[in-house]
Amino acid sequence: MGTRSNIGIQNLDGSYDVIYCHWDGYPSHNGKILYEHYQDIEKIKQLLALGDLSSLGEEIGEKHPFDTIHMTEAQRQAHEKKYGKICTAYARDRNETDTEARHYKNYDELCAMLEEAWTEWVYFYRMEDGKWYYTNNPSPTWFKCCGTEQMQTSLLTPEAWQNKVI
């Protein structure tokens, strides 16, 4: 089961551009990767240009085989060595359509989407201050199912994964 997340930019005009990521959305994985490897706005824009992701990597990377299920163990190991640190994108790597970043004109539009999304974590790079922020998804549907409390949006720092906030 994936730990789903949304990754996006809060633009200077108050709009948002957002993609979905299926795997490893918790702060100790995706949060850490975003913080350590996606501080340059051009690289962040390249990430969003990939569209929805199966997995976030340290680098944008290149087109590669999406699925390793039919590979031998040696082929899987070679695949991991060559592509293990790059993003796996649904459009680029599996030729899916309708996976591009979605644009939300304002906070209310974003919240409406998140209320229906089954993502556990949300990450936003705020153009205004050039920093990453994160929160548990404020989806009331998700929290009713899990019986957990919603977390406030916080500045993404190493403490998020060092303190085992997962």
Image: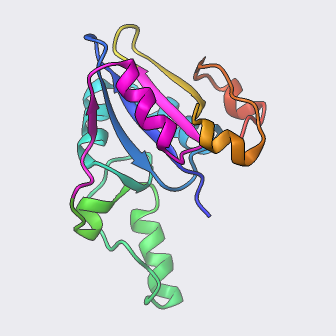
**Nearer-the-camera pick, 91 or 161:** 91
**Nearer-the-camera pick, 80 or 119:** 119
Q: Image point 34% across, 15% down: which residue?
A: 127
**Nearer-the-camera pick, 22 or 70:** 22
Relative to residue 12, is residue 159 depicted above or below?
below
Horizontal and vertical percent for residue 165? 74, 34
Q: Is residue 97 visible?
A: yes
Quadrant in the picture for the C terminus: top right
Q: Image point 29% across, 39% down: which residue?
A: 48
Relative to residue 28, is residue 99 depicted above or below?
below
Residue 64 is a magenta residue: no
Q: Is residue 91 left or right of residue 21?
A: left
Give the colour scheme of this rendering: rainbow
Q: Which residues are magenta?
A: 98-125
**Nearer-the-camera pick, 161 or 6:** 6
Residue 112 is a magenta residue: yes
